[in-house]
Image (tube, rainbow, N blue to C red):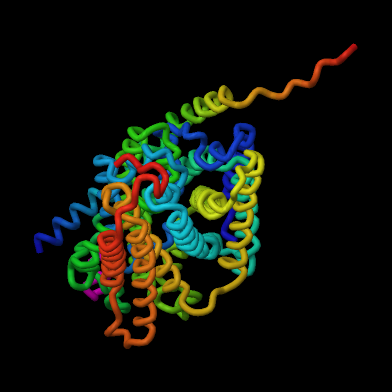
Amino acid sequence: MHLTYLDWGIIVVYLVGCMSAGIWMKRFVHGVEDFAIAGRAMDLNLGIASLAATELGLVTVMYTAQLGYTHGFAGATIGVLMAAAMYLVGASGFVIGPLRRAGVMTIPELFQKRFGTRVRWLAGLFVVLGGVLNMGIFLRLGGEFLVAVTGMNPKWLEWVMTLLLGMILLYTVLGGMLSVLVTDWLQFIVKGAGIVVTSILVITSLGWTNLVKALWICFDGTAESVGQTLKAHPFNPVHPTSFGWTYVLWQLVFQIAVVTTWQTTIARVLSCRDEGTARKMYRRTAFYFVGRFALPGLWGVAALIYWSQHGGLPADLQGLPVNDASLRATPAYLGVLLPMGFIGLLLAAALAAEMSTDSGYLLTWATVIYNDLIAPCVKRPMAPKTKLFITRALVLAIGVFLLFYGLWYEMPGNAWDYLAVTGNIYLASVFTLLVAALYWKRATRVGAAAALVLGAIGPITFLIVNKVVPVDKQISPEMAGFSSFGLAFVGMLAGSLLSKPETADATQPQVAV
Amino acid sequence: MIIDHLFLIFWTLMIFLSVAWYGFLLFYVGFKGGREILELTRTLDSQSPPAETPPESKT
């Protein structure tokens, strides 16, 4: 381990502070609404801290740093597109405005108002499957970051992450969204400090001009002894060697779907005092998402330069598949770069990133399971204490499931394909339903069911096709993504136009559109 | 290529503005968010159901 007493001190102070604040909030929880959406009492700056903290996890840092390592500065293009999407949605109120006005607790709850209970239940199932399976990978990747930075024995990874998840579960089960908000605020500060300090250290260690020159040398192949270590153009995202126009356009559409549909983001919208606060929160948080990609991306760029100038990756990474090696290159570089005390700060920031994301996600998916899968099936109204007990038990159950599914049990086959498919099913289906529910009066429950089914069939078909055809003939992610959204929209259009419009009493009162 | 230089200027701006923005939010949201937490707990305290009082003693 590279840690000194100072590093340990920083980590212990952070953990004790975080746990105390989280557990303290339990006293304010009196019902499911307090537990799931903080009694809709969240104000602007707490919303910014919570939204930013939840969506910047350790897994995000790993991927965005990897994008910097493989695509140079152009790897942050997705962050710029996400920020643009978030700002546009915040400025226009597209989806989030009517969603907040509808007074629902989850997205599927809105679908019941337009399309009935069955569509709500099916959409809830898609939301939960996509969300929980997506989260399954967080613990292991987060653990690998900690192993690489600290030099910890990899055999401890499972035990350290189990202990961390235990702490997260303790305050999330007790205080729900109230604990999540307060700990998110603390974690936002610790994480922000870690990111700023690390980025400044990275820039000053090389000097900005040297960093830019060295990055270009990695691309043009004149790096001594190692040749071309960067295959993609480091600055231009639409260059043929980089993402290209189609991918960039696809990402713009994808990010609009993410910021209007991803339940953990929407949970913050629904927790806000009012629509104005929610829209302002989006506008003010938007630029944070540029840094979410650009700053870890900068670390990835510096890692690429460092390892290129030192004869290649360290010995323990050289035998790994290319994708795994590029994922671990940045944490290994940070372990070398950061001096005593700064590693402690980076680790506290890393723990904050992991904890804020995990707690927010656990709570969100538990709320959807309770609100949209269990509650609609219960005939008699439940007592508030029973509702609260069930939601808390669900948070705990998801935590236990993740321990075994994501940490102690290694999935056979390519887990990434699995996650990409579940994510696409979720976004294509739910985004189509949301837009139709809010903006198209002619949408019917038949159209909604068709959109859900076609939105699922598309990604599954692409997965199967890509398994059986040669690599050079495989469907690209952007084509698969565009087609999934297209199929879901076609399902909604055809299903609605070919079925009779529902009468007002067929479903519950219509949402104000 | 001019386009490469323009992209380089763009990314330089994005990275330095991100460092500055993260640094600013650290203090701004840190301070204002802390005050909002206190306000939130006061609001929730005032909305909380009254504690059950024990039945009066007969003596």
Residue A219 belongs to the span the image colors magenta: yes
Query: Residue A201: image x %, image y %?
Result: 39, 51
Q: Position of residue A355 (x, y in %)?
A: 54, 50
Was residue B14 drawn as part of the magenta stretch in this picture?
Answer: no
Judge whether A183 appears above or below A484 on screen.
above
Which of these two is toward me, A327 or A219? A327
Give the vertical position of A236 relative to A170 (above or below): below
Q: Residue furthest right?
A: B59
In the displayed structure, would residue A63 be above or below residue A480? above
The answer to which of A164 and A94 lies nearer the viewer is A94
Q: Position of residue A38 (x, y in %)?
A: 51, 37
Quarter of the image with the N terminus of chain A is: bottom right
**Residue pictured at 30% horizontal, 74% vertical:** A229
Residue placed at 40% from the left, 61% from the top?
A426
Image quadrant containing the C terminus of chain A? top left
Between A500 and A337, the one nearer to me in the picture? A500
Near-viewer residue (A263 or B19): A263
Q: Which of the 4 quarters of the picture holds residue A456?
A: bottom left
Q: Is residue A8 in view from this perspective?
A: no
Magenta residues (range): A214-223
